[in-house]
Image: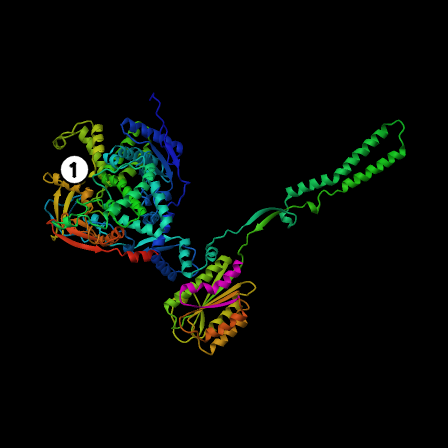
Amino acid sequence: MTVRIVDRRQDSRNKSSINRSRFIRRFKGQIRKAVADAIAKRGIRDLENGEKIGIPGKDINEPHFRHGRGGMRETVHPGNDRFAQGDQMERPSGGAGGQGKGQASNEGEGLDDFVFTLTRDEFLDIFFEELALPNLIKRQLARIDEYKRVRAGYTQSGVPTNINLVRTMRSAAGRRLAIGGPYRRRLRELQNELESLLDEANPDPDEITRLRHEIAVLRAKQEAVPFIDPFDLRYSNRVRIPQPSTQAVMFCLMDVSGSMDEATKQMAKRFFMLLYLFLNRNYEHIEVVFIRHHTVAEEVDEDTFFHSRETGGTIVSSALKLMVEIIQARYSSSLWNIYGAQASDGDNWDADSPACRELLSESILPVVQYFAYVEITEAVPQNLWREYEKLLATHAGVFAQQRIVAASDIYPVFRELFRKKLA
Amino acid sequence: MSRKRPPKIAEGSDWTFEELDRADAEIGRVARAYGLDCYRHQLEIITAEQMMDAYAAIGMPVYYHHWSFGKHFLETENRYKRGQMGLAYEIVINSDPCIAYLMEENTMAMQALVIAHAAYGHNSFFKGNHLFKQWTSADAIIDYLVFARNYIADCEERHGVDVVEQLIDACHAVSSLGVDRYKRSPPLSLQKEKERQREREAYLQSQVNELWRTLPKHEAAAQSGEEARFPAEPEENLLYFVEKHAPLLEPWQREIIRIVRKIGQYFYPQRQTQVMNEGWATYWHHTLLNTLYDEGRLTDGFMFEFLQSHTNVVMQPPYNSNWYSGINPYALGFAMWQDLRRICEAPDDEDRAWFPEIAGSDWRETFDFAMRNFKDESFIAQFLSPRLMRQFRFFAVLDDDARAKLEVSAIHDDPGYRALRLKLSEQYNLGSHDPDIQVWNVDLRGDRSLTLRHFMHRRRDLAADYERVLEHLAYLWGFAVRLEQQDEKGEVTLLAERMHDRRRATEGSA
C-alpha cells in the first residue's frame, strides 16, 4: 500500500488574497489615515515601496463573551520552587514572568496596534483613490513595464547587421532555380541535338558551329543569373516596444512664507508626488529640483523643502528667476524634458505678479514640457491667479492651473498632461 | 554480522517523493504493528505561503471569505517574516481521508516526524476518540465547507458584501455560544444539505411567523399567575436559538447563521481535547520513530534532528520564566501518555494505590480505552499521577479579588494531590472557561425583546466587550436585547441593553 502524495505547491498561492482585500476594504478609513501619515514621512520619489500600517488594536479586535478579571479564579502553574500550601503573595503587576500572565493574555487589555505591510500596489491604490484619478490613468501609472525588443518575423529592408543569412540564402536559391530553369532545359535540348549530330557519319559543320555558339550563349546567360541579388535579402524584424529612454527634470516650486501651514504643504506634497509618479512612468532618469521661496528663493534639499518654515512676505518671481537660472546652467532644454510644478497659497506682492507672468511666458513656458500651478486655498483668487489666467489662452496644453481644497482637486491640473501622453 | 542490514529510510536532508513514500510505508508498518487504527490518509506538499493561507482558515482547505481571516493571515505573515515565529510544521485535517500538510521547506527528517505525528498520531485520535466520532463527520466536512463557501459567495452576490459581512461579524461574536454541548447534531452531507436547504427555508419562515402571530390566543390565561417564559427552559445555544426564532431574519440569513454554527460545532471537540490529542500524537511520533531506530532503519543523524525538534516541542518552562505562557499541552499530554504506559508496565506502590484498575494492565488496551473515552478534563481527573505532579512541580494559585493577596491553595504534596488534580482538570473544562450565558426569555407579548442571563460562577464577571457583542446580537435579533447577570445568591442585575435601530441600518446599507 503506498500513500497518496499530492503536490499542491503549484496550486493557487493566494488563497487568502480575497480575505486580505476584504480586510483592507473594511479598515479603509484607518488605512487611509495611516497612508496619509506615511506620505507625510516619505520622500516624493519614494513611491515604489509598500508601507507598514498600524491600526489601533481596539478597532480591530473581535468581541466575544469572556470572563473579566473579577471574582475568584484558580490557576495551576508548573515549576514550583518556593511555595507551600497557604503561602500568600502580592499580585504580580503584570510584566515579566509571574502567575496570572496566562490570564492577562485573554483579558483583551494592553492591545497593541495591529501592524501589517501594504504592498506597493495596495499603497498606490489608496494614494490614487484620494487623488480621484481616472482608472485608465491609475493603470498607466501603476504599471511596471518591461521594455524590450521583440522578434516579429522578417522584412525585405533593414540594416546590414540584421540580415538573416539562412532566409536570404534560401530565397536566393529559389530565385536562381526559377530564373535559370528555362535556360537549363533549352541547354539540355541543344546538347542532345549536338551529340546526335556528332554521332552521325557525316555531320554538317555549319550546324555544329551554330549549336556550339548557341550553347555558349546560353551558358553565358545562365552564369549571368546572380548568385545573390538585393531582392533576396531578408532581415530579421524586431519590433521595439516603446522604451522610456529620455531624461527629465522636475522643478518643485513652493511658497514657504508664514501663511503656508503644514496641511497646505502636505497637499502640495501630493501634487508633487503625482507629477513625479507620472514622470517616473515616462522617463528613465529623473532629477528633482526643489526651490522654495518667500521674498528670496533658494534651492534646497527635499527635507528642508517640506519641513522648515520661514516667515515674511512673498515674491514669487524670485523662484521663477532661480528656475530660469538653473535651467540655463544645468538643464539645457535640448537634453532634458523640463517639468515645472508650483504650489502656493496665492499670496504674492501685488507688483510682482505681472513680472511672474512675463517670466513664465517669455523664459519658462517655451522650454518646458508642462508647467502646473496649484493654489491651495479657499480664499478669493488674488492677483497672481488672475495674471496666470491670461497664460491659459496663449499656452494651452503647456500650462495648467487649479485651485485646490481637497486632494481630489489635484488631478485636473494634470488632465491635459496625461491625456497627451495617453493618446 | 551475517544478516543483511535493512536499508535506511529518510537519510540525508533533502526529501523526494520516493523517500516520502518509503518513509510513510515504514512508519505505517510500525503503526499497524502497534495496532493504531487510522483513516486512510493523504499527504499534501505545500509552500510556506500556502501554510500561512491554511493558518488563516483555521487549517481548512476550503473556507468562506471574511475579513477576519485576512487579519489572521496578515498577523501570521508579519510575525513569520520578522522571524518571531516559525510556522507549525504540520496541519492535519480531521477528514476522511485524513489530510496532512507537509511544508516544502522541511528537511526529510522533519517530514518523517510530521508523517508520524499527524498522519498516524492525530489521525488515529480523530478516528477513535468518542467526541470526534460523535460530533464530527469526517467524511462530510470538506463537502460541507464547499457548500458553505459557495452559499456565502452566492449570498454576497445577491445581497451585497457589506450585509453578509455584518451578519458574519455578528455570528462570529456570539459563536462561542453556538455549540450544543449535550446533543449530537445530525451528520453533515453536501447532497442532503443542498436538498434540505430550500425546504428548511420555507419551513423555518412559517415557524417564525407562527411564533409572532398577531392575535394572542389565551390572553386571559396568561394574565393569571406568572407569565410563562419563552423558551420554557433556558437555551444555551444562542446561535441556534437566533437561527430558529429571530423574527425578522431572511431565510438566507438563517442559513448563514447555521453555517457558522455548524463549523463551530465541528471544531468544538478539538478545543476539548487539546492536551490529549497533541500528547497522543507526540507520544506516537516518538514511539514510532524510536521503534524504527531500534530496527536499524534510521540513522543517528536523523535521530539527532528529530530529538532536537521533539524536545523543543515538549518543553515546559517554569512559571517564573520569560517564556512561560501557561501549560504547554504538548508537554503535559506527552508526559501523561508516557506516564500511563509506565503505570501499566512498571507500577510502583503509589501507582497501585492510585490506579488499582490499570496498574500492571496491558498498556495498549489501557491506551485505547483512555484515547477513546475521555476529553482533557476527564483525562486529567482520571490519569494525572502524583509522580507527574511532582515532576511538573505543579501548584495552584487562588486569585480572589475580594482579598488583597494571592494564595497558594495546593501544591504537589500528599494533602494537595487530589485538590491539585481537580483544579487542573477544571482548568480544562470549557464549560467553566467560557462564561455561562443562556437565553432566558423573549418578551412574546410585549416588545419582543430578547433577554440573556449570565450565571455567575465564583463571582467572575464579564469582560467589557459584552457591550459590543450585544450590539451584534441586537443586529441578529432585530429588536432590543438585554443582558442580565445573576449572582450566586440569586440576585439579578441588568448589565446592558441594546436596541437595534433598523431604520438607521437600512439607510446605512442603502
Q: Is A22 included in the stretch rendered in magenta?
A: no
Q: Is A403 included in the stretch rendered in magenta?
A: yes
Residue B426, image x, y percentages: 17, 42
**Does the image show residue A43?**
no
Specify the amino acid type for callout 1: Ala
**Toward which corner of the image does residue B199 lie, by quadrant?**
top left
Q: Is residue A94 above or below residue A262?
A: above
Comparing A101 with A131, the one in front is: A131
Work out which quarter of the rendered image holds the C terminus of chain A and state it: bottom right
Comparing B159 with B170, the one in front is: B159
Left or right: residue B509 compared with residue A414 = left
* Residue at the (77%, 38%) spot, across then down: A183
Q: Which residues are magenta?
A: A397-423
Q: Is residue B293 above or below residue A353?
A: above
Crowding near pointer 1: few (<14 within 10 Å), some, many (20+)? some
Chain to which mark 1 belongs: B
Q: Is residue A287 above or below residue B295?
A: below
